[in-house]
Image (cartoon, rainbow, N blue to C red):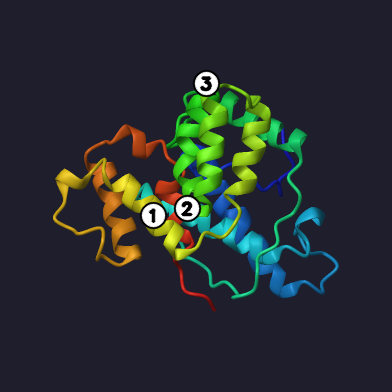
């Protein structure tokens, strides 16, 4: 269905284990290829060329998801401290990716996050990722979804684009503390004083150990930790 060098844009949590591993191998190869950017045979897709830092971040998202699922992984790659530029998100390509993941789910190949059946389920999956970026946008999207004023195709585009924005540490802390309410009775950690990396790790462990469905279907459970890695 896709060329061999297709990089998925939807959150890694929606990918089944096999597809996730394929993406990890592909992205690792592409990130390594960026060090050979002057070579004419670079495998980096043309629309990702000039966006190699974002490609490395996408790899870190995939690696963090593999870590969350307990799969072997090569470890995160270092990032620069410069602002990250992402390639334009094509609506048709995104819909093709969703069709692929849906077809695989019908064949019992499912990711950590269930595919949303409607706009409310889609919002529930991405809401804490959005909260980590912008609390006002979180409120606005929540209100618009509540009255069903956003077509789900447009909502997918908005969620994926918004989750590409680098969250501030304060934003990550805010989102993690909101999520903490689902597991607070299972831990002695203080979410107000624990460092963010430790808090995110504990949140992941508790969500998995106690099968907290709402958190296990959240993109933020996986992707936020990848933004806490030190810069190169």
Q: Along the horizontal axis of the image, is 95 left or right of 224?
A: right
- Judge the density around disc 1: few (<14), some (14-19), many (≥20) Cα neighbours within 10 Å: some
Q: Residue at x 49, y 49 (%)?
A: 135
- Label 2 to label 1: alpha-carbon separation: 7 Å
**Under tag 1, what secondary structure?**
helix
Q: Is residue 24 above or below residue 56?
A: above
Residue at the bottom extreme of this rendering:
232
* Dot 2 or dot 3, earlier in sequence: 3
* Location of mark 1 (residue): 174
Q: Quadrant of the N terminus?
A: top right
Q: Is residue 104 above or below residue 127?
A: above
Residue at horizontal 47 percent and vertical 60 percent from the top = 226
Query: Which element is circle 3 on?
Result: loop
- Disc 3 crowd rating (10 Å Cα; few below 14, some 14-19, many 20+) is few
Label 2 crowd (10 A; few <14 / some 14-19 / many >=20): many
In percent of width and height, residue 180 lies at 28, 48
Q: Is residue 20 visible?
A: no
State the residue position of label 3. Answer: 117
Q: Residue 154's spot in the image, x, y percent? A: 68, 31
Residue named by callout 2: 132
Residue 50 in view (yes/no): yes
Locate residue 55: give its quadrant: bottom right
């Amino acid at each position: 269905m896709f060329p061999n060098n297709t990089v998925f844009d939807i959150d890694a949590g929606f990918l089944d284990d096999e597809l996730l591993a394929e993406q990890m191998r592909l992205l690792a190869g592409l990130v390594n290829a960026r060090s050979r950017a002057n070579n004419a045979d670079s495998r980096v897709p043309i629309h990702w060329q000039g966006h190699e830092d974002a490609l490395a971040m996408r790899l870190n998202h995939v690696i963090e998801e593999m870590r969350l699922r307990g799969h072997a992984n090569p470890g995160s790659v270092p990032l620069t401290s410069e602002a990250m530029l992402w390639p334009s998100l094509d609506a048709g390509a995104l819909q093709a990716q969703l069709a692929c993941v849906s077809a695989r789910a019908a064949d019992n190949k499912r990711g950590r996050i269930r595919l949303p059946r409607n706009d409310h389920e889609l919002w529930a999956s991405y809401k804490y990722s959005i909260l980590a970026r912008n609390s006002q946008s979180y409120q606005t999207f929540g209100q618009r979804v509540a009255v069903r004023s956003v077509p789900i195709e447009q909502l997918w585009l908005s969620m994926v684009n918004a989750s590409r924005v680098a969250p501030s540490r304060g934003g990550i802390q805010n989102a993690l503390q909101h999520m903490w309410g689902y597991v607070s009775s299972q831990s002695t950690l203080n979410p107000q004083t624990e460092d963010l990396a430790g808090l995110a790790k504990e949140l992941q462990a508790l969500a998995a150990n106690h099968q907290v469905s709402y958190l296990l279907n959240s993109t933020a459970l996986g992707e936020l930790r990848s933004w806490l890695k030190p810069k190169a």
